[in-house]
Image (cartoon, rainbow, N blue to C red):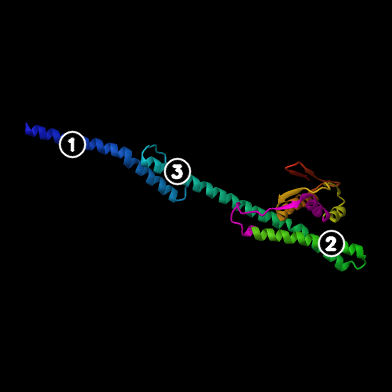
Amino acid sequence: LYIYLLLFFVISVLLVLIIYAKLTSKTLVRPIRKILEGVKTISDGDYTTKINYKSRNELGYLIESINQMSEKIQNEMELREKSEANRKKLILDISHDLKTPLTNILGYSETLKHAKELDADLRTKYLDIIISNSKKSNNLIQDLFELSHMENSNSDINLEDRDFSEFVREILVSYIPELDDNNISYDFDIPDKEILVKMNPQKLERAINNIINNSIKYGEKNMSLKLSLKDLGNNAFLTI
């Protein structure tokens, strides 16, 4: 009888151990194996990896945290790559924009040097064009310097209150000689009243200059340049 009881006890213990081993394998070993496989893939640089295992215990929370971390790293990398691509594109655009003012400076400088018969008024006009284009070139070079040191798209942009009407007028004045030389008619509708807006003057001037320069360079024959500025209360609306 004792032998049968002992045998029954041993068999019962073995069955319990087998059942426990299977349960442990399902609730502990398998998720740990999944976690190790996922972490290895992530450590190899694949941040799109998701550990697919549903569990309501602490291991489930750990898996969820790892997935969230992987997703966050992936998003940060995509933002950084996009920012770097935008930065490179801006540098190329600015380098391209430099050609126009530098060409104008060279052309009018050579004219002043070789055309001895120019009267004083015309010389003054050409000098004003050279000065204006020199300022444009300097601003673009400064933009290049800033962009070469900009690490991400979240860099602060300093804004200041400026009269948008006067700001646009100052830009347009420098273009009138070039528009006349290219036989381009123009119509500027700028309010006489002050329109205060927050802006970064240098960057906004570059944006407007880029549009006008491309219009002059790529516009069709007998084109006209129209620009209007409207005060819409909480917004200023510039149409080119």
Question: Whole-percent x and y of residue 98?
Answer: 73, 58
What residue occupies the far left of the structure in this picture?
1
The image quadrant of residue 37 is top left
Is 7 one of the magenta-colored residues?
Answer: no
- Sooner in the amino-acid sequence: mark 3 or mark 2: 3
The image quadrant of residue 125 is bottom right
Q: Secondary structure at mark 2?
A: helix
Question: Whole-percent x and y of residue 152?
Answer: 59, 53
Residue occupied by mark 1: 13
Dot 2, how many residues are within 10 Å of its Cα: few (below 14), some (14-19), or many (20+)? some
Question: Whole-percent x and y of residue 182?
Answer: 85, 53
- Sooner in the amino-acid sequence: mark 3 or mark 1: 1
Q: Which mark is residue 128?
A: 2
Q: What amino acid is at disc 3?
A: Asn
Q: CA distance from mark 3 to mark 2?
A: 62 Å
Q: CA distance from mark 3 to mark 1?
A: 39 Å
Q: Which residues are magenta?
A: 147-174
Identify the residue at horizontal 59%, vertical 49% (top origin). Answer: 82
Residue occupied by mark 3: 67
Question: Whole-percent x and y of residue 36?
Answer: 37, 46
